[in-house]
Image (spheres, rainbow, N blue to C red):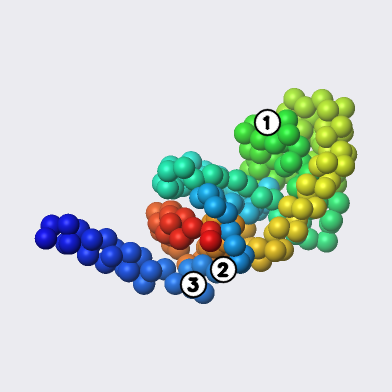
């Protein structure tokens, strides 16, 4: 009897979650088949003020996710608009940060440069200056920034943004299949709950 009640309770909770979160309102399906392992991708831009603000909440967000979830960032290519060398250059810069293993230091430096100090990044030389001002030798930056491997990876990252129908940042995509409507949540806890709901749906 007790086991039956427990099973019924689980079913009620699952049904309640399905009723609470609706496709088309809280999330959209943007890929036919997603990842086998629980994965969350944050589409973002170093130019994005909301992304800058979300960085301060990111650790709390990650702590609330289902155990074993892989988190990754994917930089978009449409900011700043009408300046392709810099918009694509910023993706390359992000990839160089990762290649150097210094994203934890260089991402905040880039965010602060734009959003805290209000300094311009209008040219690729401006991008380079952020690196060299934070301990990256000029020759090292040039080596990786101009590498064909980085250029190809940046192109693929830009294509992924289009394939996942990302038009606003930050936006979370769960299991490379479910795009969260960020406007449908009003708190960090709601975002955590919705993300975990989609993680449980899997990517099949």
For marks 2 and 3 on the same chain, the one whose residue lies earlier in the sequence: 3
What residue do we see at 33% from left, 64% from top?
14
The extreme bottom residue here reads 24
Q: Quadrant of residue 82?
A: bottom right
Quadrant of res 8: bottom left
- Residue 146 visible? The answer is yes
Kindly indicate whether the residue at mark 3 contacts the one at mark 2 (C-beta within 8 angstroms).
yes
Instruction: Give the residue at x 46% y 42%.
Output: 68
Q: Nearer the viewer, mark 1 or mark 2?
A: 2
**Residue 110 at x, y percent in the picture:** 69, 40
Q: How far from the left and from the top, in percent, is residue 83?
A: 84, 56
Q: Is residue 148 above or below residue 81?
A: above
* Mark 2 burial class by Cα count in 10 Å: few <14, some 14-19, many 20+: some
Marks 2 and 3, how far apart at CA: 8 Å
Pointer 3 local density, CA inside 10 Å: few below 14, some 14–19, many at least 20: few
Coordinates of residue 65 in the picture (x, y in percent):
44, 48
On screen, residue 129 versus residue 183, left or right, reads: right
Which disc number belongs to residue 29? Answer: 2
Label 2: which secondary element:
strand
The one of 54 and 25 positioned closer to us in this rendering:
25
Q: Which residue is mark 3?
A: 23
Closer to the eye: label 1 or 3: 3
Q: Which residue is mark 1?
A: 102
């Amino acid at each position: 009897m007790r086991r039956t009640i427990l099973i019924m309770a689980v079913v009620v909770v699952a049904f309640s979650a399905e009723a609470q979160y609706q496709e088309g309102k809280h999330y959209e399906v943007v890929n036919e088949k997603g990842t086998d392992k629980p994965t969350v991708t944050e589409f973002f831009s170093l130019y994005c003020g909301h992304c800058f603000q979300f960085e301060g909440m990111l650790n709390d967000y990650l702590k609330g996710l289902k155990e074993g979830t892989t988190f990754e960032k994917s930089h978009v290519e449409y900011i700043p608009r009408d300046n392709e060398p810099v918009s694509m250059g910023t993706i390359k810069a992000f990839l160089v940060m990762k290649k150097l293993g210094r994203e934890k230091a260089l991402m905040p430096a880039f965010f602060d440069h734009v959003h805290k100090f209000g300094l311009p990044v209008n040219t690729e030389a401006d991008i380079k200056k952020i690196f060299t001002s934070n301990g990256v030798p000029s020759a090292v930056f040039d080596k990786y920034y101009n590498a064909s491997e980085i250029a190809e990876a940046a192109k693929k990252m830009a294509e992924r943004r289009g394939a996942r129908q990302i038009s606003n940042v930050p936006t979370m995509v769960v299991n490379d299949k479910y795009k969260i409507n960020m406007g449908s949540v009003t708190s960090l806890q709601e975002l955590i709950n919705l993300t975990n709901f989609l993680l449980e749906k899997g990517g099949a």
